[in-house]
Amino acid sequence: MSIEVTEVMPGSEAERVGIRVGDHIEAYDSLDIGSNAGLFVSNVSSTEGRENVLITVTRLGTIKVKGGKLGLKVSGLEQTPSDSSGVSAGVPVHNEFMTLASYGRFMAGFGWFIVMLGGFAALIGLGVRGIGIIGLFGGVFVAIMGVGFVVNGQLVSCFVSIEKNTRKTTIALEALNNQQK
């Protein structure tokens, strides 16, 4: 069993190693892909940055490719936006992941800015006569609000990461179950 290549992008890693439309991919990174295109996509993503990854193509045999973006599309996948693998992702790529991850990073950064602002306000409050304790408490209050933003941003980023990893794990487990049948 294998998955069929339906498109090869010009100038891509797939084109460089000689993969063509109509070729069949049997294994990637020493893992039998079978007909599970989702497993293929998650495996390509997981090899980003590696130099020598083995891919088995029926017509070419086993060849070495650079890990990560291959620049091809395969059968058995919905035609949805590409993920970082350069393979059209059959598992729906949820753009809200990127939006939520960006939101989380922004909120954490904004929170740290507020914490620093509150710290400066507290220091200024201590050093200026007439403001004293009110400035100190005001600065501490602002810093505590900033910590709330930091926690909010970190939690959102954490939950986004957990969801993405859960999705990839589910694909891998489904592939293993299908191979055992």
Image (tube, rainbow, N blue to C red):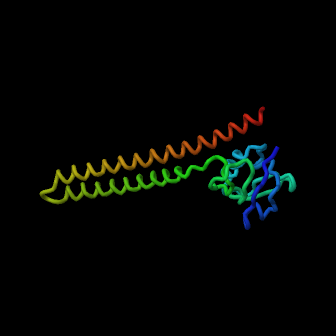
Q: Quadrant of residue 166?
A: top right
In the picture, the quarter occupied by the N terminus is: top right
Q: Is residue 83 visible?
A: no
Name the outermost residue toward the bottom: 11
Residue positioned 80% across, 58% down in the render: 21
How many numbered circles are shown?
0
Dividing the picture into quadrants, the one containing residue 123 is bottom left
Asked if residue 62 can be seen in this view, the reply is yes
Q: Position of residue 93 (x, y in %)?
A: 60, 50
Height in image: 173 above or below 82? above
Image position of 151 with respect to 125: above or below: above
Q: Is residue 167 above or below residue 84?
A: above
- Identified at 73% across, 37% down, the residue is 176
Quarter-of-image position of residue 65: bottom right
Q: Position of residue 144 (x, y in %)?
A: 31, 47
List x then y, in percent, for residue 129.
13, 59
Residue situated furthest top in the rendering:
181
